[in-house]
Amino acid sequence: MNYRCPFCEKDLKSRKLMHAVVARAETDCLHCKSRLRYNVHRAESAVVMFNFVAIAVFVTSAYWLQSKTLAIIAFGAAMLGALMLPMLERTWLKDWPRFAKAVPKTLDGDY
């Protein structure tokens, strides 16, 4: 994953933890103070959505069937989902820019 600012090309990888804790659509560059948009790849969205659905299905099934095995599988699905995003970043999305230039709003609210 490319964590460089699209304006000044400085590395913003130190903000990775902050973005994991406080997810916002836009942020400012630490160096040039330019407005940046968090650039999410479709594969990341698909992995998160698939993982959420899998966990919900396993937890619901474990509750209705009173199955400890399904509860353990739900926990395993949660752990697998937590591992899938960093692996996706390091393998398939190596060159994907994490930040993009934010589009300023006009006075009438349109982009």
Image: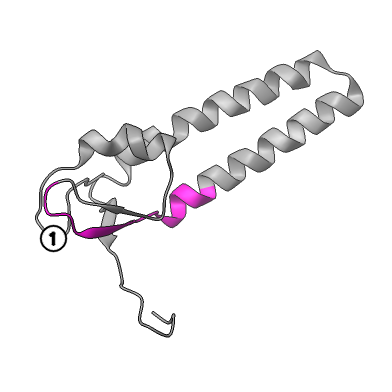
**What is the secondary structure assignment of the residue under circle 1?**
loop
Quadrant location, the N terminus:
top left
Seen at 42% across and 40% down, the residue is: 22
In the visual, does 98 lie left or right of 31? Answer: right
Q: Amino acid at mark 1?
A: Phe
Of 62 and 26, the residue lying toward us:
26
Kindly indicate the quadrant of the structure image that contains residue 37. Answer: bottom left
Seen at 69% across and 25% down, the residue is: 74
In the visual, does 4 lie left or right of 90? Answer: left
Seen at 41% across and 55% down, the residue is: 25
Quadrant location, the C terminus:
bottom left
Seen at 59% across and 47% down, the residue is: 49
Does the magenta-highlighted stretch encompass residue 32?
yes
Percent x, y of residue 24? 42, 50
Q: Which residues are magenta?
A: 31-46
Can you say whether 102 is above or below 26 in the image? below
Can you say whether 73 is above or below 54 in the image? above
Does the magenta-highlighted stretch encompass residue 98?
no
- Label 1 sits on residue: 7
In the visual, does 38 lie left or right of 42? Answer: left
